[in-house]
Amino acid sequence: MCLDFDFYRSKVNPSPPFISLVDCHEIVFNHTADWDHLTIRRDLNFTFSSDMLPDEMLKAVFPLLEGTDLTACMSVCKQWKQIAQDDYFWKCVCAKRWPSTCNNQSPPMTYRKLFTTFYKREHRKTLLPPRISLSDLDFYIDVWADDDLLFSQVVAGPVFRKGNWTPPPGICNILRHYLEGPEYKMILPVEPRFTVPYTQTVSVSVLVARKDTDKVACLINRSMFDYIDRSSYRALAFDYLVFSPVYPFVSSIRAWISLLFMEHVNENVINVFGIEIDFCDAANSEDEVLWLLDMLDWKR
């Protein structure tokens, strides 16, 4: 049997047919069945004696492997690992997945690093710690009914931290289930409560100030509560966030604000016991919210 490894190396853009690791074991077995000194089983849990396969055999088989199988081969033994580290084998892998990378005489990274870095797409990266905290923030919330001011308060950021508030008795089961759910929420209890007639137009403005930089950003600018979800006893308004020019490709993310109200005692008014702010278009945890707020167009 002649295993011409140099033949593979002579190809400018190597793209041999790929085989699986199981096939690799089968090929090795077929070519070494008459070697009395080699002990090998035809399954994934194969073992070798101290007499390992000749390097030439491995060098002929490795170019035929998929990248994940070649990676697995590096865990078999020291001999396999040393041989599989040859970047030529990884060039064969990359030639199948990204043929154009083999046209560059000086690739930007090794073919092994290229494969291990990009063969599996990362759908979600680990979020770095935010540069601000809720303790750095104050929220300025104003609610009007027509032109009458119903609610006006400066709220320290930590007040919105999840777990700081328990829903009161007397609310509907759907709303209670929502408020007690595991999803991240920023909720402000309203004390004293206020009522709003259904016949009035209710609007809201929300500014947020950073105590670490003395800058202010606008979350919601006089938006109307033009949708009332009577099944969950919430009135909702939103506005689109305005981001700093250093984030030119971020857009269409909304800040939502909800008035939470009690089950109807009087069908003509809503009795508000809480206010919720959320950024469900993009942020579903405290760290994500803080990153989002950090990207706003802050003004001094």
Image: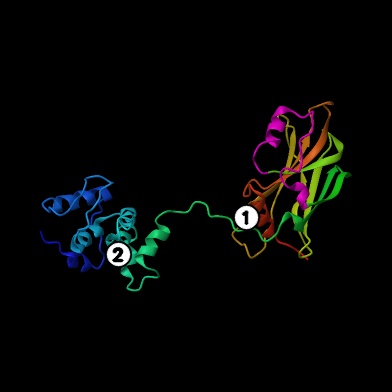
Per the model, the C-alpha gap separating discs 2 and 1 is: 50 Å
Quadrant assignment, res 218: bottom right
* Boundaries of the magenta span: 157-184
Question: Tag 1's secondary structure?
Answer: loop
The disc label shown at residue 251, or none: 1
Whether 252 is drawn above or below 98: the answer is: above
Q: Is residue 176 magenta?
A: yes
The disc label shown at residue 69, or none: none
Question: Tag 2's secondary structure?
Answer: helix
- Image quadrant containing the C terminus: bottom right
Q: Left or right: where does residue 28 sit relative to residue 165?
A: left
Please identify the dominant SS of the magenta region: loop
- Residue 251 percent coordinates (x, y): 62, 55
Can I make out residue 85 in this image? Answer: yes
Quadrant assignment, res 50: bottom left
Q: Left or right: where does residue 273 sit relative to residue 290?
A: right
Location of mark 2 (residue): 82
Crowding around mark 2 (Cα neighbors within 10 Å: few <14, some 14 to 19, many 20+) is few
Quadrant assignment, res 64: bottom left
